[in-house]
Amino acid sequence: MRKSVNYIRLEFPSRSSNEGFARMAAACFASQMDPTLNEVEDIKTAVSEAVTNAIVHAYPDSIGKVSLKAKICEGNILEISIKDAGKGIPNIDKARQPMFTTGGDGRSGMGFTIMESFMDALTIHSTPGRGTTVTMRKKIASRANGQR
């Protein structure tokens, strides 16, 4: 476990209207690390995918709780966890495969692939019937003499 320098924790209902809020909250929190615009966009995209997964897959027929925890760790690493207490994922390996979805028509099945491509690390812990936690990490480049 990495030592946290600063953190936030948010909890919100699994309504699609809260996805944008979660994305912007994570980006605003990360701004204290002085990320590039590309790094901010990467963070927003990954958080959007993780929160959307919780909304669509964890609670397909109900409204439940989603929590977002973001922390700045030593080494200029941003860690973001999205947690739900929904259906859970019976087969994480299968769920991580591109194009696999349980969300029905209109879903691309690319959520985990997108998260993985925009962040440096992605871990998924899930228990069927108890929920899922997706943790993503991204090292934010340090500025040297005001330049990147």
Image: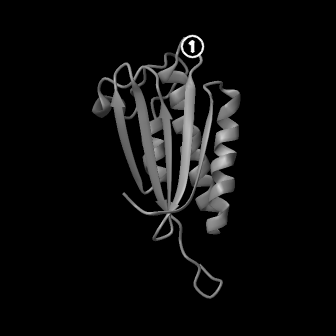
Label 1 residue SS: loop
9 lies left or right of 31: left
For disc 1, the neighbor class at 10 Å (few under 14, some 14 to 19, many from 20) is few
Q: Nearer the viewer, residue 77 or 110?
A: 77
Residue drawn at x 65%, y 56% as measured from the top left: 29
Determine whether 118 is above or below 126 in the image: below
Residue drawn at x 66%, y 65% as measured from the top left: 32
Q: Which residue is mark 1?
A: 62
Estimate the x, y position of residue 69 in percent, counting from the top left: 54, 46
Residue 31 picture quarter: bottom right
Residue drawn at x 57%, y 52% as measured from the top left: 43
Determine if residue 68 is in view: yes
User: What is the count of numbered marks?
Assistant: 1
13 lies left or right of 101: right
Residue 39 picture quarter: bottom right
Q: Quadrant of the C terminus?
A: bottom right
131 lies left or right of 32: left
Q: Quadrant of the N terminus?
A: bottom left
Determine whether 57 is above or below 6 in the image: above
Task: Specify the color scheme.
Answer: one colour
Residue 61 picture quarter: top right
Determine if residue 35 is in view: no
Residue drawn at x 59%, y 18% as measured from the top left: 63
The amino acid pointed to by label 1 is: Ser
Determine whether 50 is above or below 119 in the image: above
Residue found at the far bottom of this picture: 145
Q: Nearer the viewer, residue 132 or 114?
A: 132
Estimate the x, y position of residue 4 in percent, counting from the top left: 49, 61
